[in-house]
Image (cartoon, grey):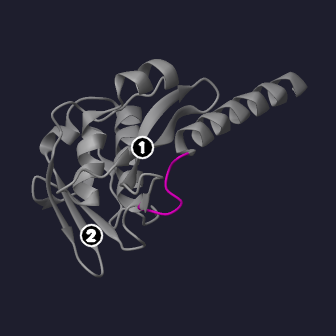
Amino acid sequence: MLKKYFKNLITISLLTFVLISCAKNGPKSNSSEDTDGKKQVTIYFTKASDELGVVLIPVVRNITEGRTKYETAFRELFLGPTIKEKEKLKLNTEIPEGTRLIKVEELADKVNIDVSGQFMSGGGSETMQARFRQLRETALTNAKGRPVFLYIDGELSKRIGGEGLEVPQPLGAKLD
């Protein structure tokens, strides 16, 4: 039992180190500037952990000139981790290739995000849960406290995936 405790402690310590390493130059708030004065957003990729299953790892990206923070965040999220992030940090994504952002509507009291139906393609329940968590955390991190609603191909999403993973609306709401 003590051996398992120390193994878990080491795993958590390593994951904490990875999180700190990824976020070291990252934003102190939802959107900030790096040392060069560039605006940044935080997006989330996945990493496999023997002890904890699939965990989310925050990654910082510079906001592309001419794009909003959401356009940049979701474009980068849907592109997936860089080759360097895949090789060195072992990051991955559960979001299917070809998923795209259709529209973001940022209002004073809420944010509506509409993504393409490719988001629903393939994968079992664990994959779908990790995929949803990636999208949800990326959306909420950049929402500045506003509720975020997810639409898929223009329809307010209630369930995703073949097994019908329930989507709480707004995305930060707790499941009953």
* Label 1 secondary element: strand
Disc 1/disc 2 C-alpha distance (Å): 18 Å
Horizontally, residue 70 falls left or right of residue 10, namely left
Tag 1: amino acid:
Tyr
Tag 2: amino acid:
Val
Q: Residues within 10 Å of mark 1 (few under 14, many from 20)?
A: many
Nearer to the camera, 143 or 165: 143
Image coordinates of residue 122 in percent, x first then y, are 23, 29
Nearer to the camera, 42 or 55: 42
Residue corresponding to mark 1? 44
Image coordinates of residue 136 in percent, x first then y, are 37, 53
Name of the residue lying farthest toward the top? 87
Please give the name of the residue rendered at 49% of the width and 40% of the height, measured from the top-left corner.
56
Judge whether 33 appears above or below 7 on screen.
Answer: below
- Numbered range of the magenta stretch: 25-31
For residue 111, which numbered disc appears in the image? 2
Q: Earlier in the sequence, mark 1 or mark 2?
A: 1
Nearer to the camera, 15 or 35: 35
Does the magenta run of residues contain 29?
yes
Horizontally, residue 174 falls left or right of residue 75, namely right
Image coordinates of residue 35 in percent, x first then y, are 48, 52
Image coordinates of residue 77 in percent, x first then y, are 30, 42
Q: Quadrant of residue 140?
A: bottom left
Does the magenta run of residues contain 106?
no
For residue 106, which numbered disc appears in the image? none
Predominant SS along the magenta part: loop
